[in-house]
Amino acid sequence: MRAWCIVLALLVAALAAEGAAFAEEPSRAAGRSSLTGVFESANVAASRGDHTAAISSYGQLIEAGVRDPDVYFNLATSFAQSGEYARAILNYERALALRPNDSRASENLRDAEKALEEQRAEIEGEATIQRSTSISDAAYGGFSEDSLAYGLLVTNLIFFIGLAWASIGRRRNRWLYPLLITSGVLLLTFALGLGTKAGLLRDGPRAVALDDRVILREGPDPRAQVRGEARGGDRGEIVDRDRDFVKLRVVSGLEGWTPAAGVGLVDSHHDVH
Amino acid sequence: MRILSLALLAIATLPWAPTAAAEPEVTVTLDAMPTEARVGDTMQLEVRVRTRGGRIQDLKLADLQKYPELEIISHQTMRPMQFSFGFGSGVRMESSFANVYVLRPTAPGTYKFSPAVAKVDGKLYRSKPLTLVVDAGVGNAHGTVDPAAKPRAALGSEMSGARYDPRAFLRTVVEPDEVYIGQQVNVTVYLYARVRLSPQSLIPGKPSMDGFWVQDDPITSLQFETVPVNGTQFRAYPIQRSVAFPQRSGELTIGPPKISFDSGSGSLFDAPQRIERVGVPVTVKVEPLPRPGPVDAVVGNYAIQARLDRNTVKTGDAVTLTVDAGGTGNVQDLRIDLPPIVGVRTLQPAIRDQQRFAGGKLSGTRSWEWILIAESPGEHSVAPIELQFFDPETEAYESVSTPALSFTASGETTRQQQTIEPVERQPRPSTATFGPIRVYSALTRGEAPVREQAWFTWVLAFPPAMFVLIVLGAGFSRRREQRSATSGAVQRQLIRNAESALHANDPRGFYDGIVASITHALDSRLGEPVAGLPHTELRRRLAAEGFDDDLMQRLVNELEGADFARFAASGVNKDEMERCLKRTVTIVERVQRLPRKS
């Protein structure tokens, strides 16, 4: 029991040290106050219905390195309110990537998809947006990547402590083997979840088609033969890059090269378009 | 990693595979639409078996042959099949088999059908029995109509809003045709046809409805009602249904509807004929709202409620005020102005609408969400919000209002910020479903995810690395203990050998044992063999290992004494050997206890 207390104390101390390392530096705090001003002015513009100004201000925040779910949410809402639904979908996806349990963002994402489909159906008769429906996304959709990473660290520690105890301990308690099995299963689950989030089950970062018609070509050249097209709001993966072109694979399996400007990456730590 | 993950997923799905072999779920139904009709009308009789996981072998409805009075106009067989995949259910095949008969009764009576019987995987399953009632008389009976459609009597008896044609014509039915401004008008366009039409070829054209705000009530399937017109039976198909709210008074005209469709005898040898029809315009008389009355009254019947999401805040923090107004009427006409609140900054509201059709009437709820930011401490009151409306049912003005609400702000007065004035007073319908904008954000900077931080790998690798070290250390320690235990056993055996020699009065054997015992103790202690070392060298090694002078002297003396005695064994008596044994045991114990020099 005393050994467990020591382990827990060490863990808490390690986390506290980590927290101290991430404590806000004065320069960062100063930068934040100016960012707050930009954020407030963006909100004022959005409240006035001046979506162009709001989008511009939220864009400044993102260019300044802010990767905050609320900023992405507001940017997405401004895009949605100005009728740019594909960009709204991209930014709602980014907000959800950072905060998966944001029910309002999920709701707005569905509304934006519906609005885009209706808008397109009105012109073309029918419309469907290609969405990702993988089992792993459904299973781990409610967890953020960081929470899975922390879960992996904690279960990893518990599992190996239990394993060490089982290997060398002279006295084995009844709960040791259930603890080992549970922590082992959790360890695998967190590892699989983190791998999924990190894109190990994908061939590239997640992306959303932004232009109404994203032409997919055989090669990274505007003169290359056309393979097909993705529509605004369609989900896919970026499987390759070449200069200003990216190779987009949409959910249906169709893939081809298209200018990078017509595609947005969901994961915020990748390049932002 | 990817292959490992896929393998894990595959393994995880294995336990569910055996469920596919479970008992099939079987449903047998026997339905008719309608179950009561008149002679000459058509009735649709459907017998269906659905199964999940089983194989349909047979489906029988024996009693259908029993009633020749029920003429079978058409018979259709359907056999859809689908596969479902799901957690806990594995891969399951769902299939169904249905026979759909269109019947025309030729004689009145009560027709009782015993249960339909289906055979699935060799087992028999039965439906519920069914009874059809057929009354005397021709046509004019219950058809398969939409509940919101106009009553059958009105369809047949009045022919306003139509230009008669013996084959097919369009009719526009408006209810009511005299209304107040803003009051709901139901507009339904019917196609009356005596010809066989192809539903897929139907292309309706909407009538123009200038001066109205229109909400369509979509028709999802083409159904008809049989009605007599000028003594001839027509099928009346509702093809378009809308609710319209007049936006100005006077006589408003609903334009003529249009339609085109293919008609044919159904024979393979007859080409379909394209038929086009245009209806007639219909006029709606719109009265202004009675005077005197409130200027900003809307039309309908509404209730209103308001709530705050919290009652105490700090200055600078936000409270959400939600107002819901719901009832019958066009909720998109509703306007609410929030009176200014001193010491509180009010952001533009987010507006959401929910509309639905119920009993042919449009009703719904409009919700406003205001963000109120307290800028000064104290109690802030939200005045009652009043909504005035004109109820066309009672033809009277009414008013509803919310109770006064209040919340308390604590803290210091925040700096006065620019008041947000709305650019447009009219909310944009397209923007109402998004938001609301979030006024607070942590403005988190773009840091790499935890898994990409340098420390993550180290922290992740630490427990397994420590585990390996601990296990290796434990193994090493165990091995050393084992070796030590082995060494001790050998030592004890050597002493016992010496004792045996003593008892056997064998001085040579005894001193061999003494030398072997001391040498073994020193070998184990120094980790190297000492036999053959000159005593000076042995002293140097023992001194380097931390042996004290007394112990070294005793060891050397004992070894020298033993060597001497081994070669002059006849001069040694038993007492001397016993003393030597005791000294040796003491020396060996001292050697073993001596702390090791690191």
Image (spheres, coloured by chain):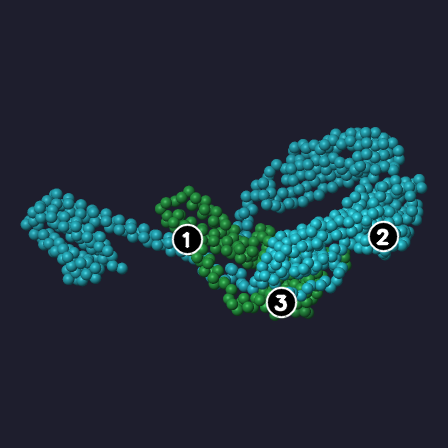
What residue do we see at 63% from left, 43% from top?
B92
Residue B71 in sight = no
* Residue type at the position of mark 3: Val
Residues at marks 3 and 2 touching, judged by CB atoms closer than 8 Å: no
Residue closer to the observer: A96 or B175: B175
Residue A4 in sight = yes
* Rendered image: mark on residue B292: 2
Q: Is residue B573 left or right of residue A234?
A: left
Residue B406 x/y as whole percent: 65, 53
* Residue type at the position of mark 1: Val
* Rendered image: mark on residue A7: 1
Of callouts 3 and 1, which one flags the residue occurring earlier in the amino acid sequence?
A: 1
Q: Chain of mark 2?
A: B
Mark-to-mark CA distance, 3 and 1: 45 Å
Same chain letter for marks 3 and 2: no
* Residue type at the position of mark 2: Pro
| Dot in front, 3 or 1 | 3
Residue closer to the observer: B93 or B41: B41
What residue do we see at 50% from left, 50% from top?
A186
Chain B, hue in figure: cyan
Q: Chain of mark 1?
A: A
Mark 3: few/some/many CA within 10 Å (<14, 14-19, 20+): some
User: How many numbered discs sit on the rendered protein?
Assistant: 3
Residue B501 x/y as whole percent: 13, 45
What residue do we see at 56% from left, 54% from top?
A143
